[in-house]
Amino acid sequence: MRSGQSRSGYVAQLRAAQYIRMSTDHQQCSPVFQRQAIAEYASAHNIRIVQDYEDAGISGLTLRERPALMRLLVDVESPARKFTTVLVYDVSRWGRFQDVDEAAFYEYSCRRAGVKVVYVAEPFENDGSPATCVMKALKRAMAGEFSREISRKVFLGHCVSVQRGYHSGGPPGYGLQRILVDANRGVRRPLARYEYKSIQTDRVILKPGPDHEVALVRKMFEWYGMRGVNTANIAARLNDFGICNGAGRPWLARNILQILRNEKYIGTNIYSRTSSKLDSAWEQLPETEWLRVPNAFEPVVDRRAFAAVQKKLRQARRVPTREELVADLRKVIARAGTLNQATLQRYASAPSVKSVMREFGSLYEAYKVVGYTPKLNPERSENRFFERRMERLLADITIEALERLGHDVAYAKHTDTLCIDHALRLQLVVRSPWLIHDHLPYWVARWPDCFAIDFLIYGRIERAGTTLLDFHVFPRGSLKPGTYTVIHRNGISHFEAFRREDLKALIELSDAVPLESLNDATLRNRASIKSGASRGPE
């Protein structure tokens, strides 16, 4: 008696699930066509379809965006499933994976759970024989190659469209608008945002947008190229006027920079600057691989103005050499008679503070190289002397206490940072107050923007003082990098939640072990003794 056949001669029907996938590559493989073919196969083989899984309009390149197939693979592993077979139209409907082993793995997962995958339109039985395995591998490779071929054809089609002067997609940009044209370039109408063409033979071109946007774009090029206004100041100027960008939001410097760099505004159509073929990660292509079509659109700005802006942008991106920086700094000294951050920021032709700091490490090192003696406030120099002395003392006491408790501590003097156990990095600073009207003290802190730390340990002292008043332990994110923040004024801490009387919190940060030896009394007493004993110029 055959398996599944009762004594009365009745043969029980097999229960199966059907998987349908439809993309846009083959109209003959529509869901209706696949269902009909699967139904005919099921009827001829006494199979009853009890479950339906369909991914409609979805590419077969990856599993990530195929919810029906993922649900099928999950249900296959469930003991409560109602089917023992999965019916699929052909190998390509199972997926056009670029790695043939991926398709085989998903099929093997079904077979391992006791569920057989049957391709109803294939000329072979999926019985696991060597011939079947070779055929399936060949079919899977052909399915993957078909996707690659379609990708190449689509890319070439886009290239031809771009070369003919049509828009390749994406937002038009501020000061531009998309225009729908027919096959003979007859203008149909402008396209609104999120509106697209509906007729296959229609195309989209770019034209200058509203007059006020065009005038504003031209003004941006004039301000940057002719007036020397940088992108941040242009954005601030527009925001002060109450002018919003194309999305209705305030302008940012990067929005201005995107406009100034884009060749669309001189009518050049550029395509293939980035690539993400076959669902791969996006990558920036070298400029030699870009497709550039001049005079594709009506220009918004003059080519000479655009060229002047590009020249200034290249100069801004160029990293000056050490010799050029030295020469420029000496020019500033000859012109202004002094050299400091304010002077460098005042003159547009002067090198930026960032470039000087990057090359020399600090302004003081740059002073040494150019042979300049800074005109420092004697009182400020004396206060800085005591700050540095207290910082070194604080670092010595902290390192001694941590090492005594078994921690590995590395100290970098040029940044006043401690690295504890090769994991926790913190900066120790001691600061005296700044004065308002020469008598109202307030303390400010600055989170470093040139190197990374996890915590800033900020100790307060009086001007030319030798006693630590208290500490503030700032975690990353509590202060804005690169800017000065007032933390204590009029006898009140603005960051009371971070204020500490001693540095026991250091051990809590590193190992959650109390640091009795680094308490407030120890720090103050040792600081007072050492500073008082060696007070005076070094």
Image (cartoon, rainbow, N blue to C red):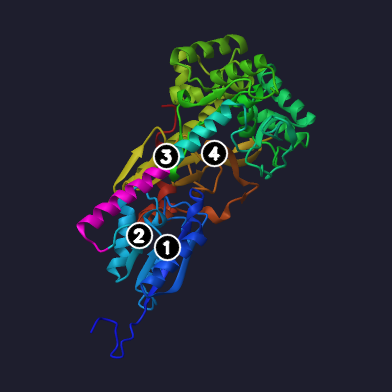
| Mark 2 and mark 3: Cα distance apart in space | 64 Å
Q: Are marks 2 and 3 in contact (CB under 8 Å)?
A: no
| Mark 1 and mark 4: Cα distance apart in space | 63 Å
Q: Position of residue 313 (x, y in %)?
A: 57, 21
> Which residue in the structure is indicated by mark 2?
513
Q: Amino acid at mark 4?
A: Ser
The local secondary structure at tag 4 comes to: loop
Q: Are marks 1 and 4 in contact (CB under 8 Å)?
A: no
Magenta residue check for 138:
yes
Instruction: Mark 1 or mark 4: name the one nearer the start of the chain.
Output: 1
Q: Quadrant of residue 227?
A: top right
Instruction: Mark 2 or mark 3: name the one nearer the start of the chain.
Output: 3
Image: magenta residue range: 127-149
What label does residue 366 carry, if any? none
Q: Amino acid at mark 2?
A: Val
Q: Are marks 3 and 4 in contact (CB under 8 Å)?
A: no
> Which residue in the structure is indicated by mark 3?
149
The local secondary structure at tag 1 comes to: helix
Density class for disc 2 (Cα within 10 Å; few <14, some 14-19, many ≥20) is few
Magenta residue check for 161:
no
Q: Amino acid at mark 3?
A: Glu
> Which residue in the structure is indicated by mark 4?
432
Density class for disc 1 (Cα within 10 Å; few <14, some 14-19, many ≥20) is some
Q: Amino acid at mark 1?
A: Met
